[in-house]
Amino acid sequence: MTDRRRAILTGAARVIARQGVRGLRVADLAAEAGVSTGLIYYHFKDRPGILRHALAFIGDRADRYTAYTTHSAAGSGEASAPSSDPRQLLEQTLLLEFQDLPEVRENSTAWGELRAHAVFDPELRDDLAAAGAAWVAEVAGHLAELCPAAAPGAVTAAAERLTALLEGLSVRWLSGLLPLEQARSLLRGAIGVEIGRLGSLSALN
């Protein structure tokens, strides 16, 4: 990715997080990124193109900060390799979405804005559904490692519940309705419940 293209997408994520999708104007994005409006249209053609590429950029950025940092109780985000323990890896994949860091807050807020806008934008909805399916598949993979005897359908359903819960808790945290530590605690509890449920289902088979 070129530096200017990255600057535009970084600016798009910032403007969407600050003003929402409806508040994203190409002129404002150009000022944020320090480029001309013509360069934005050259790279992304139109506003829907900006939104689709911004969504992919936000997803890639989330992949980086959940894969290459470790989670601490304080959410320090220290650089490290991912854990090799399946339970810790699962928790890391999910709980690192609750780091009280500017980039994580911006990313989560922008993701929520794009998700809400997809209600009115079928093209964006398709891209969002694909990104969501990839995330569910990643979480399901970690659950399958922990509960190898569980049926694939049950594992996928557990992953759907966990990712949906995370998104809801994230909105409440970012809105100031839920303290960060409580959001983390609720998600940890849900992870334990889902692992226990999959273990119980495996024992019945």
Image: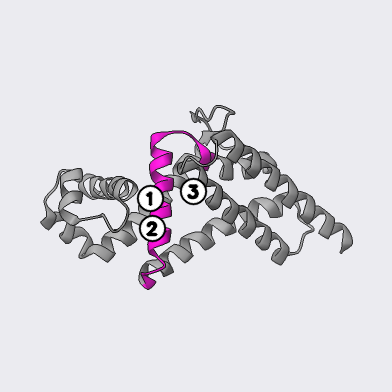
Amino acid carrying label 2: it is: Leu
Farthest bottom residue in view: 122
Image position of 17 with respect to 128: above or below: above
Which element is circle 1 on?
A: helix
In this picture, residue 13 sits left or right of residue 70: left
Q: Are marks 1 and 2 in contact (CB under 8 Å)?
A: yes
In this picture, residue 96 sits left or right of residue 5: right
Amino acid carrying label 3: it is: Val
Amino acid carrying label 1: it is: Ala
The verdict on residue 105 being magenta is yes
Range drawn in magenta:
96-122
Residue 110 locus on image (x, y percent): 38, 50
Q: Dot 3: few (<14), some (14–19), or many (≥20) neighbours within 10 Å?
A: some
Give the quarter of the image for residue 21: bottom left
Q: Which mark is residue 30?
A: none
Q: Which mark is residue 110?
A: 1
Q: Dot 2: few (<14), some (14–19), or many (≥20) neighbours within 10 Å?
A: many
Write down the residue under mark 2. 114
